[in-house]
Image: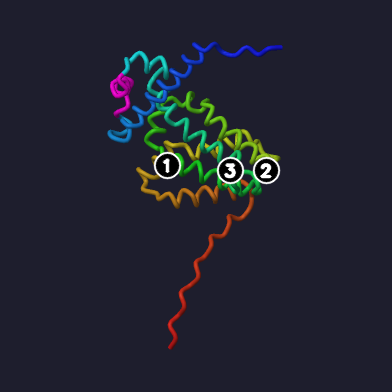
Amino acid sequence: MLEVGPAPEEACLRADAARNRARLLEAAARLIAEHGVAAVTMEAVAAAAQVGKGTVFRRFGDRTGLLMALLDHSDRMLQADFLAGPPPLGPGAPPLDRLRAFGVAVLYRYAEKLDLLLAAQTEPTRRLSHPAVSALRTHMTVLLRQIVPDADCELLAQTLLASLDPAVIHHQTRRCGMPMERLEAGWIDLVARVAGTPPPQPLRSPEPPRPSR
C-alpha cells in the first residue's frame, strides 16, 4: 500500500506559514526586549514584522494566543527536563526528590517569565486548560500517586500547583518583597508536610578555623 505524501505546493505553503510564524514571534520578542510586554499588541507586531494586521490575527487569534505562543518554547524545554532530563528533576531519582525539584524548576521558570506569563494569562479558565499547564498537573499527579497513594492526588496536584501560580509569585516577590530563596524553602517545606517526611537538611558550610592563641 503506497503512502501518499503532500504535494510539493502544499509542502511549500506549510514552509511559508512556518517562516511567517517565526517572523512574527521574533518581532514580538524584539518588542518585549526593547519596550516590555505592554508594547506587544497585534498592530505593533504586524508593523514590526512588516505584514498586515490580519496576518497576525489569522496566525494567533488574539493577543493572548500570541503571548502563549511566545511561551511555548520555554514550556517545551521544561517538559523535556522533567520527562527526560537528568535527575532529580528527570527520571532516576525517588519520587519525593523529583517533586521537590519539579516545584523549584517551575518556580524559577515562572519568576523568569513573570511579566509575559501574567500578560498571557488573563482568562483563568483558558489558562488552566492550556496543554502546558495540563502537562504540569499530570506530571505532579503521577509523582504524588507514588508518594501518597491513598490521597486524592489529582485534587492535591491542583492545590500544590496553585501555590506556584504566576499571580501568587508576583504578589509574594513584588508586593511582599519575599526573596526567591524564601519561596524555594517554602516549597520544600510544603512538600515535606504533604508527604509526612522531614524536610531535607541544608548543607552547612564548614566553620572557619578559630585563631590559635
Q: Which residue is mark 1?
A: 111
Local SS, label 1: helix
Q: Is residue 139 above or below residue 185?
A: above
Q: Do the CB atoms of the residues marked 3 and 2 lie less than 8 Å apart?
A: no
Q: In the displayed structure, would residue 24 be above or below residue 114? A: above
Disc 3 designates what residue? Answer: 85
Residue 35, above or below 18: below
The type of residue carrying mark 2 is Val
Whether 40 is among the magenta residues is: yes
Residue under label 2: 148
Residue 212: x, y in percent? 44, 86
Mark 3 element type: loop
In magenta, the rendered stretch is 39-50
Secondary structure beneath dot 2 equals loop
- Quarter-of-image position of residue 23: top left
Residue at coordinates 49% horizontally, 40% vertically from top-left? 164
Q: Residues within 10 Å of mark 2 (few under 14, many from 20)?
A: some
Q: Residues within 10 Å of mark 1 (few under 14, many from 20)?
A: some
Identify the image's colour scheme: rainbow, by chain, secondary structure or one colour.
rainbow
Counting residues from the start of the chain, the first of labels 3 and 2 encountered is 3
Q: Are marks 1 and 2 in contact (CB under 8 Å)?
A: no
Q: Is residue 197 magenta?
A: no
| Residue 83, disc | none
Residue 40 at what x, y percent from top left? 32, 27
Q: In the rendered image, which quarter contains the N terminus?
A: top right
